[in-house]
Image (spheres, rainbow, N blue to C red):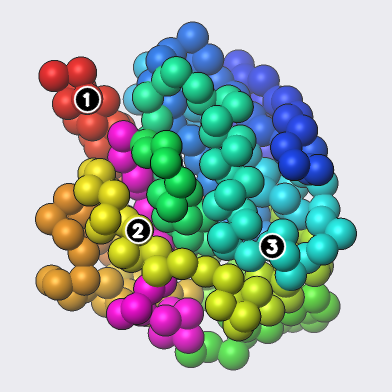
Amino acid sequence: MNCILVAMKSKFLAIDGFDIFYLEKNNQSNNIIFFIHGNSNSSRLWQHQFNDDRLSDYHLIAIDLPGHGQSSFSSDPTKDYSVQRLGDLTYQIIKRLCSGKSLILCGFSLGSNVAAEVLAFEMKPKGVILISPTVVGESVKPQDLNDKEIIGKVLFSENVEEDDLIAYLNLASPSTTDGQNAFIKEDYLKTDKKFRTGLMESALNGALSDEIKLINDSKIDCLMISNQNDKVVTPDLYNFSNLFSNTVEFVTVNMGGHYLPLEIPDQIIKNIAKFCNRVFRDSLD
Protein backbone atom coordinates (compact mmCIF):
# COMPACT_ATOMS: atom_id res chain seq x y z
CA MET A 1 0.00 0.00 0.00
CA ASN A 2 2.96 2.34 -0.58
CA CYS A 3 0.97 4.18 -3.27
CA ILE A 4 -0.72 6.28 -0.58
CA LEU A 5 2.55 8.08 0.10
CA VAL A 6 2.88 9.41 -3.46
CA ALA A 7 2.60 13.21 -3.93
CA MET A 8 1.32 13.88 -0.43
CA LYS A 9 2.68 14.82 2.96
CA SER A 10 2.26 13.03 6.28
CA LYS A 11 2.36 15.22 9.38
CA PHE A 12 1.51 15.35 13.08
CA LEU A 13 -0.55 17.95 14.91
CA ALA A 14 -0.64 18.40 18.70
CA ILE A 15 -4.27 18.82 19.83
CA ASP A 16 -5.50 18.78 23.44
CA GLY A 17 -2.94 16.20 24.63
CA PHE A 18 -2.97 14.07 21.47
CA ASP A 19 -0.51 13.77 18.63
CA ILE A 20 -2.77 13.50 15.60
CA PHE A 21 -1.37 12.04 12.39
CA TYR A 22 -2.75 13.30 9.10
CA LEU A 23 -2.17 13.06 5.37
CA GLU A 24 -2.38 16.15 3.21
CA LYS A 25 -2.37 16.80 -0.54
CA ASN A 26 -2.88 19.88 -2.77
CA ASN A 27 -2.66 22.33 0.12
CA GLN A 28 -2.56 25.22 -2.36
CA SER A 29 -6.31 24.81 -2.98
CA ASN A 30 -8.78 26.89 -0.95
CA ASN A 31 -11.43 24.13 -1.01
CA ILE A 32 -10.88 21.24 1.42
CA ILE A 33 -12.29 17.73 1.55
CA PHE A 34 -11.67 16.50 5.09
CA PHE A 35 -11.82 12.69 5.41
CA ILE A 36 -12.69 10.79 8.63
CA HIS A 37 -12.27 7.01 8.73
CA GLY A 38 -14.31 4.44 10.65
CA ASN A 39 -13.95 2.31 13.78
CA SER A 40 -10.50 0.62 13.92
CA ASN A 41 -9.44 1.94 10.48
CA SER A 42 -6.97 4.70 9.60
CA SER A 43 -6.36 7.41 7.03
CA ARG A 44 -5.20 4.64 4.67
CA LEU A 45 -8.87 3.90 4.02
CA TRP A 46 -8.89 6.89 1.64
CA GLN A 47 -5.97 5.80 -0.56
CA HIS A 48 -8.04 5.70 -3.77
CA GLN A 49 -9.56 9.10 -3.13
CA PHE A 50 -6.13 10.64 -2.54
CA ASN A 51 -4.73 9.22 -5.76
CA ASP A 52 -7.55 10.04 -8.16
CA ASP A 53 -7.29 12.97 -10.56
CA ARG A 54 -10.99 13.76 -10.21
CA LEU A 55 -10.26 15.23 -6.77
CA SER A 56 -7.00 16.92 -7.78
CA ASP A 57 -8.55 20.42 -7.60
CA TYR A 58 -9.16 20.04 -3.88
CA HIS A 59 -7.03 20.28 -0.76
CA LEU A 60 -7.33 16.77 0.71
CA ILE A 61 -6.82 16.01 4.41
CA ALA A 62 -7.28 12.62 6.09
CA ILE A 63 -6.69 12.17 9.81
CA ASP A 64 -6.04 9.21 12.07
CA LEU A 65 -8.53 9.54 14.92
CA PRO A 66 -7.11 9.23 18.46
CA GLY A 67 -6.28 5.61 19.21
CA HIS A 68 -5.97 4.78 15.51
CA GLY A 69 -3.18 4.50 12.97
CA GLN A 70 -0.23 6.66 13.96
CA SER A 71 -2.15 8.97 16.32
CA SER A 72 -1.57 8.68 20.06
CA PHE A 73 -3.76 6.73 22.49
CA SER A 74 -5.91 8.06 25.31
CA SER A 75 -5.28 7.54 29.02
CA ASP A 76 -9.02 8.00 29.65
CA PRO A 77 -10.76 5.84 27.00
CA THR A 78 -14.36 6.26 28.14
CA LYS A 79 -14.02 10.06 28.03
CA ASP A 80 -11.87 10.52 24.94
CA TYR A 81 -13.31 7.76 22.76
CA SER A 82 -16.92 8.93 22.87
CA VAL A 83 -18.26 10.23 19.55
CA GLN A 84 -18.95 13.59 21.18
CA ARG A 85 -15.34 13.94 22.30
CA LEU A 86 -14.09 12.75 18.89
CA GLY A 87 -16.30 15.42 17.32
CA ASP A 88 -14.80 18.03 19.64
CA LEU A 89 -11.23 16.97 18.84
CA THR A 90 -11.98 16.87 15.10
CA TYR A 91 -13.46 20.36 15.33
CA GLN A 92 -10.26 21.56 16.98
CA ILE A 93 -8.18 19.91 14.25
CA ILE A 94 -10.29 21.57 11.57
CA LYS A 95 -9.86 25.00 13.20
CA ARG A 96 -6.08 24.53 13.10
CA LEU A 97 -5.74 23.05 9.62
CA CYS A 98 -8.61 24.58 7.67
CA SER A 99 -8.88 28.18 8.84
CA GLY A 100 -9.91 30.55 6.06
CA LYS A 101 -10.81 27.79 3.62
CA SER A 102 -14.09 26.27 2.46
CA LEU A 103 -14.69 22.78 3.79
CA ILE A 104 -16.63 19.61 3.06
CA LEU A 105 -16.56 16.82 5.64
CA CYS A 106 -16.48 13.23 4.39
CA GLY A 107 -17.00 10.49 6.97
CA PHE A 108 -17.15 6.73 6.62
CA SER A 109 -19.17 4.60 9.08
CA LEU A 110 -18.13 5.84 12.56
CA GLY A 111 -16.60 8.78 10.73
CA SER A 112 -20.13 9.76 9.73
CA ASN A 113 -21.02 10.03 13.44
CA VAL A 114 -17.92 12.14 14.09
CA ALA A 115 -18.73 14.40 11.12
CA ALA A 116 -22.27 14.90 12.44
CA GLU A 117 -20.94 15.68 15.95
CA VAL A 118 -18.72 18.43 14.46
CA LEU A 119 -21.94 20.19 13.43
CA ALA A 120 -22.65 20.89 17.13
CA PHE A 121 -19.99 23.62 17.01
CA GLU A 122 -20.27 27.13 15.60
CA MET A 123 -18.08 26.60 12.53
CA LYS A 124 -20.14 25.01 9.74
CA PRO A 125 -18.76 23.22 6.68
CA LYS A 126 -20.14 23.86 3.21
CA GLY A 127 -21.36 20.27 3.04
CA VAL A 128 -21.16 16.78 4.51
CA ILE A 129 -20.71 13.41 2.79
CA LEU A 130 -21.65 10.32 4.80
CA ILE A 131 -20.55 6.96 3.37
CA SER A 132 -22.01 3.75 4.86
CA PRO A 133 -23.54 6.05 7.49
CA THR A 134 -24.20 5.05 11.09
CA VAL A 135 -25.65 8.32 12.38
CA VAL A 136 -28.12 8.03 15.24
CA GLY A 137 -30.77 10.13 16.92
CA GLU A 138 -34.25 10.07 18.37
CA SER A 139 -35.54 7.99 15.46
CA VAL A 140 -32.53 5.68 15.04
CA LYS A 141 -30.88 4.25 18.15
CA PRO A 142 -27.42 2.62 18.22
CA GLN A 143 -29.02 -0.78 18.79
CA ASP A 144 -30.98 -0.35 15.55
CA LEU A 145 -27.83 -0.32 13.42
CA ASN A 146 -27.32 -4.08 13.37
CA ASP A 147 -28.26 -7.30 15.10
CA LYS A 148 -25.32 -9.55 14.23
CA GLU A 149 -23.28 -10.95 17.11
CA ILE A 150 -20.03 -10.94 15.11
CA ILE A 151 -20.19 -7.15 14.68
CA GLY A 152 -20.39 -6.58 18.42
CA LYS A 153 -17.56 -9.05 19.00
CA VAL A 154 -15.23 -7.31 16.60
CA LEU A 155 -16.12 -3.61 16.77
CA PHE A 156 -16.79 -3.25 20.49
CA SER A 157 -14.43 -5.73 22.19
CA GLU A 158 -10.81 -5.47 23.32
CA ASN A 159 -9.73 -9.02 22.55
CA VAL A 160 -10.90 -10.63 19.33
CA GLU A 161 -10.21 -14.12 18.06
CA GLU A 162 -8.53 -14.41 14.66
CA ASP A 163 -11.44 -16.42 13.26
CA ASP A 164 -13.94 -13.76 14.37
CA LEU A 165 -11.94 -10.98 12.73
CA ILE A 166 -11.76 -12.93 9.47
CA ALA A 167 -15.48 -13.65 9.64
CA TYR A 168 -16.19 -9.95 10.15
CA LEU A 169 -14.01 -8.94 7.19
CA ASN A 170 -15.76 -11.48 4.97
CA LEU A 171 -19.08 -9.99 6.05
CA ALA A 172 -18.10 -6.31 5.92
CA SER A 173 -15.81 -6.16 2.90
CA PRO A 174 -16.63 -9.02 0.50
CA SER A 175 -15.25 -7.15 -2.52
CA THR A 176 -11.88 -5.97 -1.21
CA THR A 177 -8.68 -7.53 -2.50
CA ASP A 178 -6.42 -9.70 -0.35
CA GLY A 179 -4.02 -6.78 -0.05
CA GLN A 180 -6.75 -4.40 1.07
CA ASN A 181 -8.07 -6.89 3.61
CA ALA A 182 -4.51 -7.28 4.91
CA PHE A 183 -4.16 -3.58 5.70
CA ILE A 184 -7.72 -3.35 7.11
CA LYS A 185 -6.70 -6.15 9.47
CA GLU A 186 -3.37 -4.44 10.19
CA ASP A 187 -5.12 -1.17 11.05
CA TYR A 188 -7.59 -3.05 13.24
CA LEU A 189 -4.81 -4.74 15.21
CA LYS A 190 -2.91 -1.45 15.54
CA THR A 191 -5.94 0.36 17.01
CA ASP A 192 -6.01 0.92 20.75
CA LYS A 193 -7.98 -2.06 22.08
CA LYS A 194 -9.61 0.20 24.63
CA PHE A 195 -11.02 2.38 21.86
CA ARG A 196 -13.71 -0.17 21.04
CA THR A 197 -14.81 -0.75 24.64
CA GLY A 198 -14.49 2.97 25.44
CA LEU A 199 -16.71 3.79 22.48
CA MET A 200 -19.35 1.31 23.60
CA GLU A 201 -19.23 2.35 27.27
CA SER A 202 -19.50 6.04 26.43
CA ALA A 203 -22.49 5.37 24.14
CA LEU A 204 -24.22 3.41 26.89
CA ASN A 205 -23.58 6.39 29.18
CA GLY A 206 -25.33 8.66 26.68
CA ALA A 207 -22.25 10.52 25.37
CA LEU A 208 -23.64 11.00 21.87
CA SER A 209 -25.87 13.61 20.31
CA ASP A 210 -29.01 13.42 18.24
CA GLU A 211 -26.86 13.40 15.13
CA ILE A 212 -29.79 13.25 12.72
CA LYS A 213 -31.13 16.45 14.29
CA LEU A 214 -27.71 18.08 14.00
CA ILE A 215 -27.66 17.27 10.28
CA ASN A 216 -31.17 18.58 9.72
CA ASP A 217 -30.72 21.72 11.84
CA SER A 218 -27.47 22.61 10.07
CA LYS A 219 -29.41 23.16 6.83
CA ILE A 220 -26.26 22.39 4.85
CA ASP A 221 -26.05 20.10 1.83
CA CYS A 222 -25.53 16.47 2.81
CA LEU A 223 -24.88 13.43 0.63
CA MET A 224 -25.54 9.98 2.09
CA ILE A 225 -24.15 6.99 0.19
CA SER A 226 -25.44 3.59 1.32
CA ASN A 227 -25.23 0.06 -0.04
CA GLN A 228 -28.40 -2.01 -0.18
CA ASN A 229 -26.21 -5.10 0.33
CA ASP A 230 -24.50 -3.76 3.46
CA LYS A 231 -24.35 -6.50 6.12
CA VAL A 232 -22.96 -4.22 8.85
CA VAL A 233 -25.73 -1.61 8.84
CA THR A 234 -29.38 -2.37 8.07
CA PRO A 235 -29.64 -1.14 4.45
CA ASP A 236 -33.05 0.55 4.66
CA LEU A 237 -32.42 2.13 8.07
CA TYR A 238 -32.54 5.70 6.77
CA ASN A 239 -35.19 5.24 4.09
CA PHE A 240 -37.87 7.27 5.83
CA SER A 241 -39.19 10.33 4.04
CA ASN A 242 -39.65 12.29 7.26
CA LEU A 243 -36.27 11.40 8.83
CA PHE A 244 -34.09 13.97 7.05
CA SER A 245 -34.60 17.46 5.66
CA ASN A 246 -34.71 18.21 1.95
CA THR A 247 -31.04 19.26 2.01
CA VAL A 248 -30.06 15.58 2.32
CA GLU A 249 -29.45 13.70 -0.94
CA PHE A 250 -29.47 9.90 -0.99
CA VAL A 251 -27.43 7.66 -3.27
CA THR A 252 -27.91 3.90 -3.03
CA VAL A 253 -25.48 1.45 -4.62
CA ASN A 254 -25.76 -2.32 -4.95
CA MET A 255 -22.13 -3.41 -5.12
CA GLY A 256 -19.58 -4.27 -2.45
CA GLY A 257 -20.30 -4.36 1.26
CA HIS A 258 -19.67 -1.80 4.01
CA TYR A 259 -16.17 -0.62 3.01
CA LEU A 260 -17.32 1.30 -0.05
CA PRO A 261 -14.29 3.68 -0.37
CA LEU A 262 -12.15 0.58 -0.96
CA GLU A 263 -14.61 -1.78 -2.62
CA ILE A 264 -16.14 0.48 -5.26
CA PRO A 265 -13.76 3.47 -5.31
CA ASP A 266 -14.74 4.62 -8.81
CA GLN A 267 -18.41 5.06 -7.88
CA ILE A 268 -17.55 6.69 -4.57
CA ILE A 269 -15.07 9.13 -6.12
CA LYS A 270 -17.53 9.99 -8.89
CA ASN A 271 -20.21 10.86 -6.32
CA ILE A 272 -17.78 12.78 -4.09
CA ALA A 273 -16.50 14.80 -7.06
CA LYS A 274 -20.02 15.57 -8.33
CA PHE A 275 -21.19 16.72 -4.89
CA CYS A 276 -18.06 18.79 -4.14
CA ASN A 277 -18.06 20.42 -7.57
CA ARG A 278 -21.66 21.54 -7.04
CA VAL A 279 -21.38 22.62 -3.41
CA PHE A 280 -18.14 24.56 -3.81
CA ARG A 281 -19.44 26.18 -7.01
CA ASP A 282 -22.73 27.14 -5.35
CA SER A 283 -20.85 28.66 -2.39
CA LEU A 284 -19.23 31.12 -4.84
CA ASP A 285 -22.49 32.17 -6.51
- At a point 82% along the width and 53% down the height, the residue shown is 73
Q: Residues within 10 Å of mark 1 (few under 14, many from 20)?
A: few
Of marks 3 and 2, which one's residue comes earlier in the chain?
A: 3
Q: CA distance from mark 3 to mark 2?
A: 20 Å
Whether residue 64 can be seen here: yes
Image coordinates of residue 127 in percent, x first then y, are: 31, 40
Disc 1: which residue: 283
Evaluate whether residue 185 shows in this view.
no
| Left or right of residue 18: residue 168 | left
Earlier along the polypeptide chain: callout 3 or callout 1?
Answer: 3
What range of the chain is rendered magenta? 126-146
Tell me the amino acid under the disc marked 2. Answer: Leu
| Residue carrying label 3 | 81
Q: Main secondary structure of the magenta part?
A: loop
The residue sitting at 13% across, 71% down in the picture is 241
In which image quadrant can residue 154 be found?
bottom right
